[in-house]
Amino acid sequence: MSMRDAVGGYGLVSRLFHWLMAFAIIAMFAVGIWMVDLDYYSPYYHSAPNLHKSVGILLLIALALRFGWRLANVTPDDDDLKPFERTASRIVHWGFYPLLLALMVSGYLISTADGRPIEVFGWFSLPSPGENKGLEDTAGAIHAYLAYAVILIAVVHAAAAVKHHVVDRGRSLSRMWSGPPTA
Ligand code: HEM
Ligand code: HEM
């Protein structure tokens, strides 16, 4: 089993990053929507945001590692795509990185605007850049818009992957799951 990416497809590391992060990001979206409406007397009033923030910071670290891995590997070929599809998929694939980074940074800024650090599962804490009361609302609005944008693009991205698999009988979905063909 190949760890690294090859011209023929993604290696194990990229596939684990892809599917674990896709799952976690979708779950983060659901938790985010749910937790902002929690009542003060809910038993999850503190634990849900703490979980959301802790997982979010781990995802930020994972995003950086994944981006480094992406740059350190060859990009699998996409020459079975039509020129339009190739352009669109490259914009979406690369576009996810800055969008996700901005989503995570805006989340960090909401959480630390009161001057308090983020405790990541009690394992380590990420300091606040300093108290900035007005920032909470601005960062919160940006965070919500970015979260919706990421999920909307992910839906289009997944629909394209499924269409390419079922209608065009392309190999990208299969190889994103099981890796490049072994010679
Ligand atoms: C995968 C990344 C993330 C996704 C998909 C996500 C998604 C969301 C969503 C959908 C909401 C609800 C927005 C609303 O309806 O107002 C939310 C709220 C929130 N998120 Fe995230 N989030 C992510 C990462 C983070 C990170 C890294 C942090 C901080 C370290 C964070 C902190 C918060 C906070 C504090 C709120 C509550 C904001 C408020 O009270 O209005 N999020 N998130
Ligand atoms: C929030 C969810 C998702 C994000 C952020 C995401 C992000 C990405 C990114 C950045 C790539 C480029 C490779 C890389 O840099 O790792 C990629 C490739 C891919 N994604 Fe996703 N993805 C998500 C969900 C999905 C879903 C749900 C599906 C399928 C139903 C899917 C199918 C694929 C496939 C087939 C490729 C490989 C395309 C190729 O062969 O070039 N993704 N995804």
Image (tube, rainbow, N blue to C red):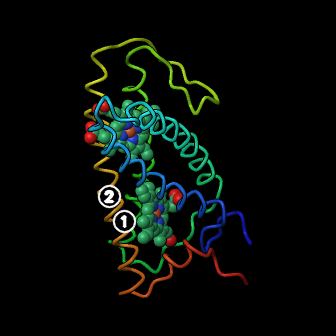
Q: Nearer the viewer, residue 108 or 70?
A: 108
| Mark 2 CB near ligand 2 (8 Å cut) | no
Residue 4: mark in rendering = none
Q: Nearer the viewer, residue 157 or 47?
A: 47
Q: Position of residue 61 (x, y in %)?
A: 57, 40
User: Quick one: quadrant of the C terminus?
Assistant: bottom right
Q: Amino acid at mark 1?
A: His
Residue at image point 35% right, 50% down = 30
User: Quick one: quadrant of the N terminus?
Assistant: bottom right
Dot 2 surroundings within 10 Å: few (below 14), some, or many (20 or more)? some
Residue at image point 64% right, 58% down = 73
Q: Is 29 rendered above or below residue 7?
A: above
Q: Quadrant of ligand 1?
A: top left
Q: Position of residue 34 (x, y in %)?
A: 31, 45
Could you tell whether 121 is left or right of 116 in the image?
right
Dot 1 surroundings within 10 Å: few (below 14), some, or many (20 or more)? some
Q: Is 15 rendered above or below residue 49?
A: below
| Mark 1 CB near ligand 2 (8 Å cut) | yes
Residue at image point 48% right, 40% down = 56
Could you tell whether 37 is left or right of 175 in the image?
left
Asked if residue 144 shows in the view, the reply is: no
Q: Amino acid at mark 2?
A: Ile
Residue 158 image-quadrant placement: bottom left
| Whole-number angstrom distance, CA of label 1 to CA of label 2 | 6 Å
The answer to whether mark 1 and mark 2 are in CB contact below 8 A is yes
Residue at image point 56% right, 76% down = 175
Q: Which residue is mark 1?
A: 157
Q: Secondary structure at mark 2?
A: helix
Q: Position of residue 138 (x, y in %)?
A: 26, 26
Asked if residue 158 shows in the view, the reply is: yes
Q: Which residue is mark 2?
A: 153
